[in-house]
Image (cartoon, coloured by chain):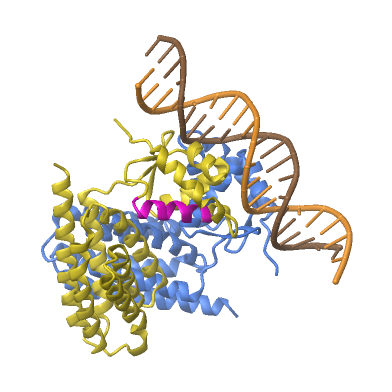
Chain colours: A yellow, B blue, C orange, D brown
DNA sequence: GCATATTTGTCCGTATGTATA
DNA sequence: CTATACATACGGACAAATATG
């Protein structure tokens, strides 16, 4: 039952974040630092996050660190095993399938409800598409992925439901963990930029049903691609 | 800026839960105790939960108690204000509206997907209806409310999505806070038992679309009734 | 507006229990 | 089975923010 330990390098790298800790609630700032370390793949899925090592490196007490762990646990980025500690979440193929099942449920229902041109309310979607195009031009694939996530987050905002927004935020945070199985992010995200633009065009015309169909095939394809990558990696 | 203090009685009442603390993780057991105290209306919405008073009454340290608070915060049962402490959540009319918006989204999508008789998978729904009938006979209105919640939780389980289940669990936990504006729980929950039976009958026939229509009007009526009670109470 | 008391935020040291080599 | 490492939980301490008179 091997559980990968954090590399010495990963712990040492935390030192540079030390200065960032100095504004609001310590536990939340701590969670911010760890969250980006995880979603950027710095801590790989499966690694154990040692209370002592991280607390020592960042200069915070274990009590405070544990509060930060609680926050990240509820975001599903780490898992907590009693008396064993916390580990960076490892998603299974079933998780990916469920993630896309719920995305389809929420995103499709949201665009389906669009029956007339939303006008200015599409501004965040336009901004996300533009950020994506910019990132693609600069061949900045990580940013392209971020822009894609922003687009779909903004899409759900059209429903005007705070709770739906929050659920979606959680789903997309988990999805970032999945994206790290894609060693070559370029061919993955690039085509979806075009498809986002098509969805946006349909919404602009108030054609929610058309947008739903585009979105459904978008999500089906993405899911297929990701689960295939997962299975290939499981060799 | 008055914040209702906990009554002496409420603190003293906690002592009886002391013996229950003795199995798994202290913070989680602690959260279990507090959760039932809150959802059963023992701690009314808006009351501040004093670290010292509760920790003292239950015989746990402040650090452990704070971990339990974190858990409940993420269940949205309490809210945390920096340097002020934690308070039992007070839901607004907007919250109720959002709660029902998301319920409609999830529950309707779930039953709509039913196209053939689910057979044995309806067993938990049948059990919830029977528990409701039993509670109604015994005029046990609290249990009737619990059975209603169980029915709708079981309904969503038909979708076979762990994440959807969890979202629904959270929504229904919040809803319990809302039910406490209903001073007379009897006339509220009773008619919905009949409607649950109708929904169950439609599902048994594999008529997902029919069940969706019944469910939609169920949720519309419940929302109207609750928001009306809220507004009346705000005088 | 000011001073005081209360309460939370954060940290430390330590004892105990649990998992694993 | 023993030893080690680690998480769990407690109690105490002080700083910082807030509430109260």
Residue B59, position as x, y percentages in the image: 62, 38
Q: From this viewpoint, which residue is outermost toward the front?
A: A138
Q: Nearer the viewer, residue A135 or B234?
A: A135
Residue A7, position as x, y percentages in the image: 38, 38
How many labels were placed on the picture? 0
- Please indicate whether residue A233 sits to the left or right of residue B171 in the image: left
- Please indicate whether residue B178 sits to the left or right of residue A101 in the image: right
The residue positioned 25% from the left and 84% from the top of the image is A203
Locate residue A202: give its quadrant: bottom left
Q: Is residue B33 visible?
A: no
Above or below — where is B105 with respect to A210? above
The residue positioned 17% from the left and 82% from the top of the image is A210
Residue B129, position as x, y percentages in the image: 29, 58
The magenta stretch is A29-41
Locate residue A119: give its quadrant: bottom left
Magenta-drawn stretch contains A38 = yes
Magenta-drawn stretch contains A165 = no
Q: Nearer the viewer, residue A111 or C6?
A: A111
The residue positioned 47% from the left and 56% from the top of the image is A32
């Amino acid at each position: 039952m091997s559980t990968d330990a954090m590399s010495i390098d990963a712990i040492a790298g935390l030192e540079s974040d030390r200065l960032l800790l100095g504004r609001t609630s310590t536990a939340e700032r701590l969670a911010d630092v760890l969250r980006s370390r995880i979603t950027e793949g710095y801590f790989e899925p499966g690694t154990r996050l040692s209370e002592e090592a991280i607390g020592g490196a960042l200069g915070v007490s274990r009590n405070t660190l544990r509060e930060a762990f609680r926050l990240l646990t509820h975001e599903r980025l780490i898992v907590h095993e009693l008396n064993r500690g916390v580990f960076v979440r490892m998603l299974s193929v079933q998780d990916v399938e469920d993630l896309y099942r719920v995305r389809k449920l929420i995103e499709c229902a949201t665009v389906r409800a669009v029956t007339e041109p939303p006008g200015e309310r599409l501004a965040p979607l336009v901004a996300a598409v533009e950020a994506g195009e910019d990132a693609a031009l600069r061949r900045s694939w990580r940013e392209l992925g971020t822009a894609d996530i922003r687009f779909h987050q903004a899409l759900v905002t059209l429903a005007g439901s705070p709770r739906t927004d929050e659920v979606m935020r959680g789903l997309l945070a988990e999805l970032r963990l999945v994206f790290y199985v894609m060693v070559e992010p370029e061919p993955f995200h690039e085509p979806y930029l075009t498809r986002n633009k098509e969805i946006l065009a349909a919404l602009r015309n108030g054609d929610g049903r058309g947008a739903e169909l585009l979105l459904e095939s978008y999500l089906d394809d993405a899911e297929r691609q990701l689960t295939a990558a997962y299975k290939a990696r499981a060799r």
